[in-house]
Amino acid sequence: MVSTTHAIFRGLQDDLKTILRDLPASVAPKIKQGLTDAHRKLSDYYTKFDESPFYTWSALLDPRILYQCMKEDYADDVSLT
């Protein structure tokens, strides 16, 4: 469950980015601002979730996530060397 939350946050952010990019110029500024605020809030949650050790542990324990993929994702993390 925890490991899928990360993917959901990312998917929602991507969807909002696409919606914002494809909006016609005639859309009310309040709608654009609301979508931008929603994207920013998801980004805040994504960052907090990503910094949590619970995500890493749940990902390691989830049999659907391959160790090799995790190793590649964190290859540049100097705190793990």
Image (tube, rainbow, N blue to C red):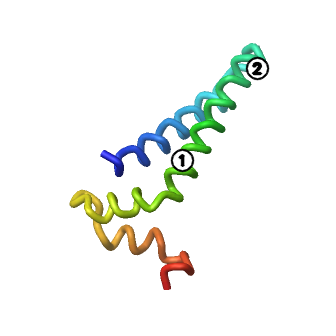
Most extreme residue toward the bottom is 81
Q: Which residue is mark 2?
A: 25
- Residue drawn 53% across and 34% down? 15
Q: Is residue 32 above or below residue 78?
A: above
The amino acid type of the residue labelled 1 equals Tyr
Most extreme residue toward the front is 53
The answer to which image quadrant residue 23 occupies is top right
- Helix, strand or loop at label 2? It is loop
Measured from the top left, where is residue 30 in percent x and y? 75, 17
Mark 1, residues whose alpha carbon is within 10 Å: few (<14), some, or many (≥20)?
Answer: some
- Helix, strand or loop at label 1? It is helix
Mark 2, residues whose alpha carbon is within 10 Å: few (<14), some, or many (≥20)?
Answer: few
Measured from the top left, where is residue 60 in percent x and y? 31, 65
- Does residue 24 appear to the left or right of 5 in the view shown? right
- Residue drawn 68% across and 30% down? 37
Measured from the top left, where is residue 31 in percent x and y? 69, 18
- Residue drawn 35% across and 63% down? 57
Q: Which residue is mark 1?
A: 46
The amino acid type of the residue labelled 2 equals Ala
